[in-house]
């Protein structure tokens, strides 16, 4: 009896330890693609891997990982701003943050955060359409709040990253978070939204993707965007030629 009781107690405490150490299903989003091109442009947007391809990414975005899986990658891709989110770092430095995320600090030169094992930088033009994609991470179901993704471009041309306060001085473009394809796995439904590239002189700008899950709980992703001609670095040349298809798509 004693033996049984003891082993039951051990089992119970083992279970308690197990459940407290079982990683919670981390379910917060990040930008998966900054320049998503649909195979079939039109009203039936297919954000799934079959529906198009990605031509531009966030900073140091690892390629060849399953869609929506980067919260369990090392480093994890989701950066939650810590403290007062209006004064927090706009882009993860892989040190600060409630969830530290991946290092999305501006590289010097900025092109160094692209190419090779990482995705290409986005090259676009004022007035062209950019479509950004993100994984639903369980938050596009009907019982979830209607949240919005905010997109803003820095006004600092070829400069260092603005602060979150400077970004907030801008009016962001708002995209409905739950604009997602249907899918059997709520965590992996593919979502996204499109907008016109705002007016900027040719150059390189920070684009911030920012999303609030619960009040005060903000997640961000950061990308450098080359708008128009300008300092085209080595990792941009290959993408540049294909920029034509952006124009093509944008004007139709
Ligand atoms: C993040 O990247 C920046 C820019 O390349 C670098 O200076 C910094 O040391 C990196 N931080 C970490 C924690 O890896
Ligand atoms: C996407 C984008 O840049 N949105 C806004 C960010 O802030 C500037 C400056 O206020 C606006 O012009 C943009 O429309």
Image (cartoon, rainbow, N blue to C red):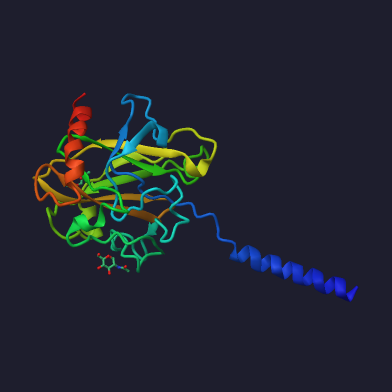
* Relative to 200, 7 lies left or right: right
In-front residue for pair 198/106: 106
* Image position, residue 33 (x, y; %): 33, 44
> Is 8 left or right of 131, judged from the image as shown?
right
Q: Position of residue 129 (x, y in %)?
A: 23, 34
Q: Relative to residue 141, is residue 102 depicted above or below?
A: below
Q: Is residue 48 visible?
A: no
Is 122 placed left or right of 97 in the picture?
Answer: left
Q: Quadrant of ligand 1?
A: bottom left
Q: Quadrant of residue 133?
A: top left
Q: How many marks?
A: 0
Q: Residue at x 18, y 62 (%)?
A: 108
Residue 232 lies, with reference to residue 112, above or below; the image says above
Q: In the picture, which quadrant includes the C terminus?
A: top left
In the rendered image, the quadrant that contains the N terminus is bottom right
Q: Is residue 198 above or below residue 12?
A: above
In front of the other: 71 or 136: 71
The answer to whether any part of residue 56 appears in the image is: yes
Q: Nearer the viewer, residue 12 or 238?
A: 238
- The percent coordinates of residue 229 (x first, y second) are 9, 43
**Residue farthest right in this picture:** 1
The image shows residue 251 at horizontal and vertical percentages of 18, 26
């Amino acid at each position: 009896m004693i033996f049984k009781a003891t082993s039951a107690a051990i089992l119970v405490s083992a279970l308690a330890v197990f459940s407290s150490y079982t990683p919670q299903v981390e379910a917060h989003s990040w930008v998966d693609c900054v320049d998503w091109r649909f195979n079939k442009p039109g009203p039936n947007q297919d954000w799934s891997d079959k529906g198009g391809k990605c031509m531009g990414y966030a900073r140091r975005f690892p390629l060849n990982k399953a869609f929506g899986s980067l919260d369990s990658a090392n480093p994890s891709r989701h950066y939650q701003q810590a403290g007062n989110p209006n004064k927090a770092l706009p882009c993860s430095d892989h040190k600060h943050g409630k969830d530290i995320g991946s290092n999305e600090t501006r590289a010097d030169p900025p092109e160094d955060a692209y190419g090779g094992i990482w995705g290409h930088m986005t090259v676009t033009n004022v007035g062209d359409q950019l479509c950004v994609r993100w994984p639903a991470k369980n938050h596009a179901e009907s019982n979830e709040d209607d949240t919005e993704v905010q997109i803003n471009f820095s006004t600092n041309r070829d400069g260092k990253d603005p602060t979150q306060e400077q970004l907030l001085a801008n009016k962001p473009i708002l995209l409905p978070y739950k604009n997602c394809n249907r899918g059997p796995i709520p965590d992996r439904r593919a979502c996204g939204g499109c907008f016109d590239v705002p007016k900027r002189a040719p150059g390189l700008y920070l684009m911030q993707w920012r999303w609030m899950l619960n009040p005060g709980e903000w997640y961000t992703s950061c990308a450098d965007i080359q708008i128009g001609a300008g300092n085209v670095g080595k990792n941009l040349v290959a993408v540049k030629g294909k920029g034509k298809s952006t124009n093509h798509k944008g004007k139709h």
